[in-house]
Image (spheres, rainbow, N blue to C red):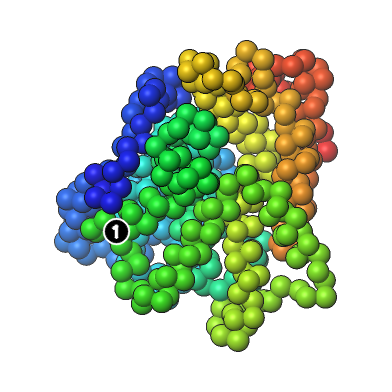
Amino acid sequence: VLPAFSIKLNMARRHSQSGEPMGHELSAPHVDTLEEEEEDVRKNRRTTSELVDSNVAVILNDLDFDGRSRGNIKQDARTLASGFMDPHPLLERYSIDLIVLTRWIEAIAEKYNQVPYHCWRHAFDVFQFSYMAITVGVAHKFFNYQDILAMFIAIIAHDVGHLGVNNNYLIQTGHQLALTYNDKSVLENMHASVCFMMLGTPGLNFLADQPKPQYANLREKVIDAILATDMAHHFEFVDRFTARVSAQEMPFQEDTKDDRSRQKTSKGDRRMLLQAFTHMADLGHCCRPWKVHKHMVVLLEEEFFLQGDREKEAGLPVMPLMNRNQDSAATAQGFFLDKMVIPLLVPYTNLLLPDLGKRLLDNIEENKQRWAQLVEKHGKKTAAELVPLDNNAPTI
């Protein structure tokens, strides 16, 4: 077990998607195997280009991407590591060894639990959304290279070790994580902690060559980005972000990558944008095409219901949306999309190329309509019951 991390993240009863009990412990990866893989690469004299996923641009720029298509950790790690290379030369700029980076991604992926929604596929999906935004959407112009590196690292680890229950559950049950993090952004603090603990594992520190001041700054950005995914701070952040985007007299600085003066004057804005882009990507499935989004809601609903099952078994009040006998994520989508996601999405799309921004806004409007139509036609059923009844006819 990682020496600095003695807390085991086991629930009294854990479930996979199949409903089988499972346990989980955040332990160090088996480094011998990783070293053998590196030696195999060197013996065969494989070049960096051979380690790169040649389809990376197609996958990571796909507007219709479906995260359910991923799950092969070795291939996924190869694809994501390739995303650090093109179009932004992060490996070269920060002296990052591609093999070590790929190891770290694999090790992080292995620490994701097999819960219905907050699993490794979700992490890949969030990375793809953010990559698409800064490449297809050309939002990279608002960030310097370190910001992009921090965003990618944060997103890969942003839900690592997720237990399939929310912060409130951990607090109400007096879970050791809640005690460790004093009831403040419990899961998010744990995700950030694990991110850097894995970096401290022999053979996984792809940032080993970073000077201390630059590493400290990067670490701060990664932590801020992960903590920004806590929905408890959503409304306060959306208010601040919207106000800043609306300040037309002070537009966001662009082209800060190689201009130290611009980097200094844009520091606060870039930190806010890093948080906004990470948070929006975490909610990105809401503005995926309907054919993708509807299945994500079904997975999230099942994770909610599993938490509700635990609450019932423990004699606790069942939280809203968690009761499989009376709740439905489908009926909640109208409020969630309209009142929570769209207020973040609208200012966010102002920072993207208009075509991509319009596509995302059109998608979320269609998703709202689809849920409303299904509920109106079939009544209050769960998302899992409604989705098979959908005929996929376009509405807009």
Q: Which element is circle 1 on? A: loop
Along the line of sight, which residue is nearer the eye, 231 or 280?
A: 231
Which quadrant would the C terminus be assigned to in this image? top right
The furthest residue to the top: 325
The residue carrying pointer 1 sits among few (fewer than 14), some (14 to 19) or many (20 or more) residues within 10 Å by Cα, namely: some
Look at mark 1 in the image and give the residue it sits on.
Answer: 200
Along the line of sight, which residue is nearer the eye, 141 or 310?
A: 310
Which quadrant would the N terminus be assigned to in this image? top left
Along the line of sight, which residue is nearer the eye, 98 or 391?
A: 98
Q: Is residue 121 above or below residue 45?
A: above
> Residue at coordinates 39% horizontally, 22% vertically from top-left?
13
Residue 110 picture location, percent across and down = 35, 42
- Can residue 349 be seen here? The reply is no
Disc 1 residue type? Gly
| Left or right placement of residue 116 versus residue 8 in this view | right
Residue 199 picture location, percent across and down = 33, 58
> Residue at coordinates 35% horizontally, 67% vertically from top-left?
207
Residue 3 picture location, percent across and down = 24, 50
| Left or right placement of residue 101 versus residue 362 in this view | left
**Count of numbered marks:** 1
> Residue at coordinates 33% horizontally, 64% vertically from top-left?
206
Q: Is residue 255 above or below residue 232?
A: below
> Residue at coordinates 73% horizontally, 59% vertically from top-left?
240
Residue 126 picture location, percent across and down = 55, 48
- Can residue 248 be seen here? The reply is yes
Which picture quadrant has residue 20?
A: top left
